Image (cartoon, coloured by chain):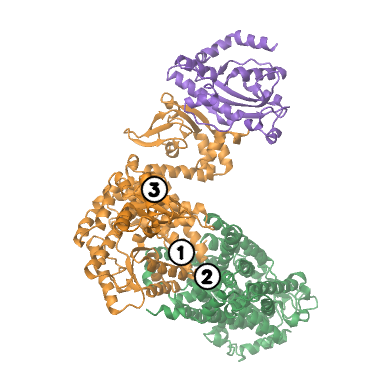
Chain colours: A green, B purple, C orange
């Protein structure tokens, strides 16, 4: 059976499984079995959260980015993992005690201001948009390859499927569907990684294979070989960073605090009934995320070695284009690999530099987002593994997108429309508005998925940057500074997000040519500017707070109570 | 000469009119007309507004009612409040001739009904003449005369104001209408006519001429 | 032209459903109308099955008779008829009898079809009207059932009042001048007290008080009262419970508008249910109460035939349970001495919602002050056991979940109860949510009202937790309405292979849950679903039509449930087989379920940010 048929079967089967689980969960709940069972066990909830967490960016793009930029790509790994820890330990427990279900609600009530709530809602919508755009791009890549269409059509197909799944299907909120998605995702990620690790290093675990010697008889370490190849072809050394220290630091920080402010993940911590279970499931989530994240660097380096070896040939002189492996041809059809035989020798040569640059020897342009998907093909793994990866990529994108679309549609229809503009709107109209909002959100995100301002991980990084500069400081001050007032919070959020969005838009859209370290503020790239945005937010907030009257007494009292809990002990007094 | 014309029309009835009179009054088409006037003298005073309500086979066709306000009224003698017409609604009016033309087209095979035809029809006839739309209706019925005849037959003493539209309607327990304009009154007259015809007939056949 | 000037237009616009409909619909309706004069002689001309019409009465009086000649309804100005055959396509089965002739508006089938197709609210209105007519069992007997009447229907208008500083002798003069046996004492037109003949005798003559003292010294302050729109039944209940003979009647603004006396009520026809409650309140012994309790099922059977508003039956049964509870508590205190501290006997669940049925079990609890001594605790333990055991003996089953004042877990001090509630709210596990569904429907039965008030205030402050609301909303959505993807009924099956729909669990209970959630969110204290809905309709950010929809659905399902209960055929309680319904009823039922589903989704969406 060819790859395409198998992909249809496996992706189709995974969808059938999600739907079956949804139906089963509903039927099950009507029999009230779950009341007797005491709800969803923390392990399952941990998996579901991990599925929410791991987006197409984590699945498709992170290994790709590490694979291409090497050591520097590690910032994503550190930032995302760190962000999760920050959220689970520092924010979620306090927000939960506050008894607010969404970030805008917390901000609106903590800062006793409808304006603050509205600003927060708009920030949330903005962030979610950016984030979904990244997901759409990811889904587009998957579909374009496996249906053998160009990336644009791939995004359209993805758009339709996501819309049906998330909006019409009402699949969100069923924990066990997400558990299934996590299983598909992790299986799809690990199987090819283990295969390749076995083939290249003889180690079953990719994590150990990563640090082992190659089995091709050379006895070289994987990373040493990669460093050698990179140097040979004019790339920076794989294990050496090319980004400045401050930029690496800024990006990591932005990713971390941005993650902690992402609205759709915070909600996950509130759907677990017991505080104790929340902690256990958060720990499980970390384990499940770690399984994928620790595999990523190994996948990245194996893929890199394989890629260079396959394109440039074992001797490094290049492979005949006419005899190029089928995966090159397949990906060429999507437009994500392009070959330009500049020296006319009929062979492909891959090296540093841009393919479009006539002075560069590089003849091949490879989109980073295809690395994880192409990896099994490059390594010549069986067709079903390739199909499995497609299903995994879609699972990753679906689980995240469904959550984000819900945040957008509830924010638009409930927080903006019902609460602010038209309080007397009927239930039916509210639901219609929500579906419309989701539809518009998908359409706009699809546009950005087709015309991306960067690759998937980078788009997502922007989303995090925006979250970092708007929500995180406001949440943190809301919890830990009882004096902080609404004027400060609003001014901080606005200046943070305007600064960050402005910086990103300038370098990515208005003047992309100027996007080089020399022009950057403090040498910080647009990916990391969220950190400065966060500092701007803090600074403006404290300044404004100083010159305006401090928060009302009862708010200060409330903040005090939440940080020094006494209610929880009283609850067990009887 | 207006008077001569009307006399001729009234007394010298052509053959087809005789058919009309022998027709079943429940199966005939009617047009109930009401006018609002600035005074009682057809020579001096003017038509403020005109409205009509068609009845076909005992059904009042509400959707086909018409109501025109004459925007050429030179002098609103009576309080405009009485007619419910102020300068705003005057502005929405049309020249009287237009209304008459519209009415003229409907008259062919219909019997006209007024409440107090003597007054209204004299105004209308004059106006038709002026507009050069000489017209001879099939027949004219008057709910006021019908009521007068009915009360007289029952041997009741007929008090001075007992024949006003409102008082007639009250006798049939028809709803009380608070607002007075040509359209409402035409509608009220139409309802009154149906009530009268039904109560006089009490299920027996009733010809148009019995109502004359 | 200018149809709006017309009386017809004015009449139609004020008429349901057009007062809520698009003006385009109203205009179309008016333009398509024909007016006729309807008499006994010509009625067959209009009412014939070959050309069905919708009729709207403008004037006159008409009776609708069924095939057996029974009057189904008396219609007058503003009433519609003819819609059942338009809706069902079946020939006209009822007959019309003209009482007073008058003008009737006709709408032909063609125009009816157009409106029905283009304006859903128009169609809905008539579908519901039809349902109500079908469901109003023995329409004619409605006027006989006086206890379901409103107080304003039977009271004499006109309040005889006096200022608090009126001299007693002047007050007495006023009373004899107006020929009344009681006087309302008002200050700034608000009721502050009441004096009665008996007060003049017992507190003035017997005590030798001077007739020149002011009435404020002898009046009963903050008297019990009722509102004009309350049911007569409630007034009777209150009089019996408090053993008083005069009840001031207040309007919505709390201004006194009259007095209702025991004699007024006795003048009305005697009614068994109310008498029974009266007897329970006066029962001499536990054995008496048990004997009276035996009459309840039979009584209910007779009563349920007669009421049009089925919510009254739940009220009646809850009232009987309240009466038994109160009397048992009093009897206990007569035997064992007065309670050592104030306490409140509270009830939960269906008794609190006043939706009790014959199958309902006990849900009650005892609220006490904090820090009681061991002997005080012993006293209340004995009280709880005494009342609950005797209620079981009276036929009110033991609660399988142990929610009874005889259990230690339901006999707690104020802070104990509050902690219990707040722990559920803070950790909304499935079990906690299940508890909340029962415990958040809460009503005071007997004892100290002020203790209960501080308790309900405490609960309201702890419920302000969105995470808790979100869990409630998620839970509501876990219970699905029995409508499938393609608008077909999803039936359940029992061992006997009967297929059925559970109207209570899949309909009424979901509405109750949704309404409870909104009520908690809006700080509404009432426990009864309809009362909660009425209170919600007054809130600013609540859409009125959503509330009316829920009310309609609730009523419809409750009535349907009662109708089928009367004609059981081996199905579980509260269940129906849709095959037994007419196609129109099936359509209405689907519509009701659809509305519930939508309300469910909206609740999940608003509170839990879930499922579109």
Q: Which dot, 1 or 2, sits closer to the camera?
A: 1
Q: Is residue A114 visible?
A: yes
Q: Are marks 1 and 2 on the same chain?
A: no
Label 3 crowd (10 A; few <14 / some 14-19 / many >=20):
some
Secondary structure under the numbered disc 1 in the rendered image:
helix
Q: Are marks 2 and 3 in contact (CB under 8 Å)?
A: no
The chain carrying label 2 is A
Q: Which residue is mark 1?
A: C520
Residue A174 appears anywhere in the view? no
User: What numbered label is drawn on residue C40?
Assistant: none
Measure how far apart labels 2 and 3 are at the Cα level. Answer: 62 Å
Query: Nearest the camera: A7 or A286?
Result: A286
Please say if the residues under marks 3 and 1 sit with CB atoms less than 8 Å apart.
Answer: no
Q: Residue at x 54, y 61 (%)?
A: A167
Q: Quadrant of the N terminus of chain C?
A: top right
Q: Nearer the viewer, mark 2 or mark 3?
A: 3
Q: Which residue is mark 3?
A: C174
Furthest residue to the right? Answer: A359
Label 1 resides on the chain identified as C
């Amino acid at each position: 059976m060819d790859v395409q048929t198998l992909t249809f079967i496996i992706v189709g089967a995974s969808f059938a499984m999600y739907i079956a689980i949804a139906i089963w969960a509903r039927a099950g709940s009507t029999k009230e079995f779950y009341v007797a069972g005491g709800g969803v066990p923390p392990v399952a909830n941990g998996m579901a959260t991990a599925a929410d967490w791991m987006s197409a960016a984590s699945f498709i793009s992170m290994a790709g980015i590490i694979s291409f930029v090497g050591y520097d790509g590690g910032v994503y790994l550190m930032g995302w993992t760190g962000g999760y820890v920050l959220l689970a330990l520092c924010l979620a427990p306090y927000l939960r005690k506050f008894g607010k279900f969404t970030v805008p609600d917390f901000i609106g009530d903590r800062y006793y201001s409808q304006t603050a709530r509205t600003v927060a809602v708009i920030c949330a919508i903005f962030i979610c948009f950016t984030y979904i755009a990244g997901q759409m791009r990811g889904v587009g890549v998957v579909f374009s390859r496996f249906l053998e269409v160009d990336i644009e059509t791939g995004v359209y197909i993805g758009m339709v499927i996501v819309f049906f799944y998330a909006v019409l299907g009402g699949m969100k909120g069923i924990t066990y569907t997400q558990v299934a998605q996590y299983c598909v995702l992790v299986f799809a990620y690990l199987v090819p990684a283990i295969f390749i690790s076995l083939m290249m290093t003889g180690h079953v675990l990719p994590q150990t294979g990563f640090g082992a010697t190659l089995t091709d008889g050379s006895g070289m370490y994987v990373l040493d070989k990669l460093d050698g190849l990179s140097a040979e072809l004019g790339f920076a050394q794989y294990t050496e960073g090319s980004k400045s220290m401050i930029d690496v630091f800024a990006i990591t920080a932005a990713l971390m605090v941005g993650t902690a402010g992402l609205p759709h993940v915070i909600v996950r911590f509130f759907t677990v009934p017991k505080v104790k279970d929340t902690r256990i499931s958060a720990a499980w989530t970390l384990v499940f995320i770690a399984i994928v994240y620790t595999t990523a660097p190994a996948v990245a380096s194996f893929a890199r070695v394989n890629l260079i070896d396959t394109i440039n040939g074992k001797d490094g002189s290049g492979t005949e284009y006419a005899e190029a492996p089928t995966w090159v041809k397949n990906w060429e059809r999507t437009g994500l690999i392009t070959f330009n035989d500049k020296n006319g020798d009929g062979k492909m040569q891959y090296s540093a530099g841009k393919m479009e640059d006539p002075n560069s020897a590089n003849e091949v342009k490879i989109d980073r987002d295809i690395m994880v998907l192409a990896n099994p093909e490059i390594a010549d793994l069986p067709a079903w593994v390739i199909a499995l990866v497609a299903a995994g990529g879609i699972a990753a994108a679906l689980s995240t997108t469904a959550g984000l679309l819900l945040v957008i549609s509830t924010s638009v229809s409930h927080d903006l429309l019902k609460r602010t503009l038209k309080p007397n709107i009927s239930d039916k109209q509210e639901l219609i508005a929500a579906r419309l909002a989701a539809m518009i959100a998908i359409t706009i995100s699809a546009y950005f998925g087709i015309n991306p301002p960067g690759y998937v991980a980078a788009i997502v990084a922007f989303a995090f940057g925006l979250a970092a500069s708007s929500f995180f400081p406001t949440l943190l001050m809301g919890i830990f500074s009882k004096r902080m007032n609404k004027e400060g919070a609003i001014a901080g959020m606005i200046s943070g997000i305007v600064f960050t969005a402005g910086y990103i838009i300038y370098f990515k859209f208005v003047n992309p040519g100027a996007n080089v370290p020399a022009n950057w503020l403090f040498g910080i790239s647009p990916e990391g500017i969220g950190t400065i945005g966060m500092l701007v937010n803090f600074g403006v907030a404290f300044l404004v707070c100083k010159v305006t009257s401090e928060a009302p007494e009862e708010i200060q009292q409330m903040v005090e109570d939440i940080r020094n809990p006494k209610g929880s002990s009283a609850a067990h007094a009887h | 000469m207006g008077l001569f014309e009307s006399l001729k029309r009234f007394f010298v009835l052509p053959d087809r009119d005789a058919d009309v009179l022998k027709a079943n009054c429940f199966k005939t088409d009617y047009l109930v007309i009401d006018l609002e006037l600035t005074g009682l003298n057809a020579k001096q005073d003017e038509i403020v507004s005109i409205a009509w309500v068609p009845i076909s086979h005992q059904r009042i066709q509400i959707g086909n009612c018409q109501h025109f306000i004459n925007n050429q009224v030179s002098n609103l003698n009576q309080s405009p409040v009485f007619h419910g017409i102020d300068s705003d609604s005057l502005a929405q009016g049309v020249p009287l001739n237009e209304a008459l033309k519209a009415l003229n087209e409907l008259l062919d095979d219909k019997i006209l009904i007024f409440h107090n035809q003597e007054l209204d029809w004299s105004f209308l006839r004059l106006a038709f003449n002026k507009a050069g739309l000489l017209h001879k209706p099939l027949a004219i019925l008057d709910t006021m005369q019908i009521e007068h005849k009915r009360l007289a037959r029952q041997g009741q003493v007929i008090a001075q104001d007992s024949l006003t539209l409102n008082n007639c309607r009250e006798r049939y327990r028809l709803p009380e209408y608070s607002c007075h304009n040509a359209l409402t009154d035409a509608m009220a007259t139409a309802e009154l006519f149906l009530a009268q015809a039904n109560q006089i007939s009490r299920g027996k056949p009733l010809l148009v001429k019995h109502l004359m | 032209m200018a149809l709006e000037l017309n009386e017809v237009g004015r009449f139609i616009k004020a008429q349901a459903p057009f007062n809520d409909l698009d003006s385009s619909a109203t205009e179309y309706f008016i333009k398509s109308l024909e007016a006729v004069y309807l008499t006994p002689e010509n009625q067959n001309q209009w009412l014939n099955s070959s050309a069905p019409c919708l009729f709207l009465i403008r004037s006159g009086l008409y009776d609708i008779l069924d095939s057996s000649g029974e009057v189904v309804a008396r219609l007058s100005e503003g009433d519609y008829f003819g819609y059942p055959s338009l809706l069902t396509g079946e020939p006209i089965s009822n007959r019309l009898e003209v009482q007073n002739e008058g003008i009737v508006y006709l709408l032909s089938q063609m125009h009816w079809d157009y409106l029905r197709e283009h304006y859903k609210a128009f169609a809905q209105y008539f579908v519901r009207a039809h349902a109500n007519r079908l469901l109003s069992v023995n329409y004619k007997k409605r006027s006989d059932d006086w206890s379901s009447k409103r107080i304003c229907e039977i009271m004499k208008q006109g309040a005889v009042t006096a200022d608090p500083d009126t001299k007693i002798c002047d007050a007495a003069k006023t009373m004899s001048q107006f020929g009344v046996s009681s006087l309302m004492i008002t200050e700034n037109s608000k009721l502050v007290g009441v004096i009665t003949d008996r007060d003049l005798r017992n507190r003035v003559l017997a005590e030798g008080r001077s007739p020149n003292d002011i009435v404020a010294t002898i009046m009963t302050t903050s008297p019990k009262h009722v509102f004009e729109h309350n049911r007569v039944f409630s007034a009777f209940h209150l009089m019996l419970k408090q053993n008083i003979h005069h009840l001031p009647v207040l309007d919505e603004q709390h201004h006194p508008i009259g007095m209702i006396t025991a004699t007024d009520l006795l003048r009305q026809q005697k009614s068994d249910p109310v008498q029974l409650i009266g007897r329970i309140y006066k029962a001499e012994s536990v054995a008496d109460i048990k004997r009276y309790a035996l009459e309840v099922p039979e009584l209910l059977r007779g009563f349920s035939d007669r009421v049009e508003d089925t919510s009254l039956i739940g009220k009646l049964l809850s009232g009987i349970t309240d009466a038994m509870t109160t009397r048992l508590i009093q009897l206990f205190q007569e035997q064992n001495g007065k309670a050592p501290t104030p306490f409140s006997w509270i009830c939960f669940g269906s008794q609190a919602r006043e939706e009790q049925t014959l199958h309902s079990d006990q849900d009650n609890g005892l609220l006490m002050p904090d820090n009681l001594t061991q002997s005080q605790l012993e006293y209340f333990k004995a009280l709880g056991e005494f009342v609950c055991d005797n209620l079981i003996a009276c036929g009110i089953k033991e609660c399988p979940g142990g929610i009874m004042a005889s259990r230690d877990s339901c006999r707690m001090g104020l802070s104990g109860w509050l902690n219990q509630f707040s722990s559920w709210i803070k950790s909304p596990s499935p079990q906690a949510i299940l508890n909340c569904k029962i415990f958040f429907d809460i009503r005071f039965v007997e004892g100290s009202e002020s203790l209960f008030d501080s308790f309900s205030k405490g609960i309201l402050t702890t419920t302000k937790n969105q995470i808790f609301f979100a869990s409630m909303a998620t839970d509501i959505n876990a219970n699905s309405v029995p409508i499938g993807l393609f608008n077909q009924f999803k039936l359940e099956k029992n061992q006997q292979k009967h297929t059925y729909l559970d109207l209570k669990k899949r309909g009424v209970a979901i509405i109750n849950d949704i309404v409870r959630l909104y009520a908690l969110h809006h700080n509404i204290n009432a426990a009864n679903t309809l009362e909660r809905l009425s209170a919600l309709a007054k809130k600013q950010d609540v859409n009125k039509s959503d509330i009316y929809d829920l009310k309609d659905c609730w009523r419809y399902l409750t009535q349907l449930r009662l109708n089928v209960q009367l004609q059981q055929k081996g199905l579980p309680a509260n269940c129906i087989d849709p095959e037994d319904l007419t196609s129109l009823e099936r359509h209405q039922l689907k519509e009701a379920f659809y509305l519930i589903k939508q309300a469910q989704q909206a609740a999940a969406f608003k509170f839990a940010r879930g499922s579109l």
